Amino acid sequence: MHELGIVFYIIDGVKAAAQDNNVSRVEAVTVELGEVSGVVPDLLQDAWNWAIKREPIMDEATLFTEVQPALNQCDDCKETFSPTKFGKTCPACGSPNTHLIQGSGAIIKNIAAR
């Protein structure tokens, strides 16, 4: 379950941001998950609920997730399109020369603190 590793990464980032900003309590964290990141939101939430109990600064913090749509770009015609709808083939020109430009990561989008 790589979701636990992702949660530890998020917690480390949140703790660093809290320290840099003299925050004493984190109340909520919003994470943007790429549509094709492979992260399972329910498993991420379970890992979050387990891990935050070990972090006094955020032991009751709520995790919110938002989905970032996946987006491919064609190297030939520069069209952008949804790989979940069209696969790797550009729907505009039929080229297989495409690459993912967004939607594969997990990013801390917002930290609510007091």
Image: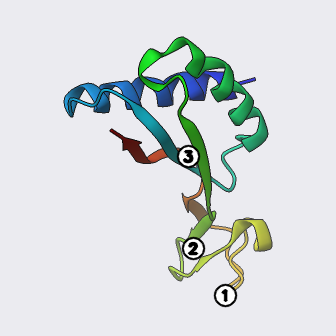
Report the residue marked by disc 3: 105
Query: Separation of disc 2 and disc 1 at Cα?
Result: 9 Å
Q: Is residue 50 above or below residue 27?
A: above
Query: Along the horizontal axis of the image, is 68 left or right of 16?
Result: right
Asked which quadrant contains residue 21, the reply is top left
Report the residue marked by disc 1: 92
Query: Separation of disc 3 and disc 1 at Cα?
Result: 26 Å
Q: Mark 2: which secondary structure?
A: strand
Q: Residue at the far top: name it.
A: 54
Q: In percent of the image, x 40 and y 45: which residue is there?
A: 112
**The one of 48 and 25 positioned closer to us in this rendering:** 25
Q: Position of residue 40 (x, y in %)?
A: 76, 41
Mark 2 crowd level (few <14, some 14–19, many ≥20, 10 Å Cα): many
Task: For the residues labelled 2 and 1, say whether their Cβ atoms are less than 8 Å apart.
Answer: yes
Q: Is residue 114 above or below residue 66?
A: above
Q: Mark 3: which secondary structure?
A: loop
Residue type of the residue flagged with mark 3: Gly
Q: Position of residue 96 (x, y in %)?
A: 69, 69
Q: In percent of the image, x 47 and y 26: which residue is there?
A: 58
Q: Earlier in the sequence, mark 3 or mark 2?
A: 2
Query: Separation of disc 3 and disc 2 at Cα?
Result: 20 Å
Report the residue marked by disc 2: 74
**The one of 49 and 9 positioned closer to us in this rendering:** 49
Residue type of the residue flagged with mark 1: Ala
Q: Position of residue 70 (x, y in %)?
A: 63, 63
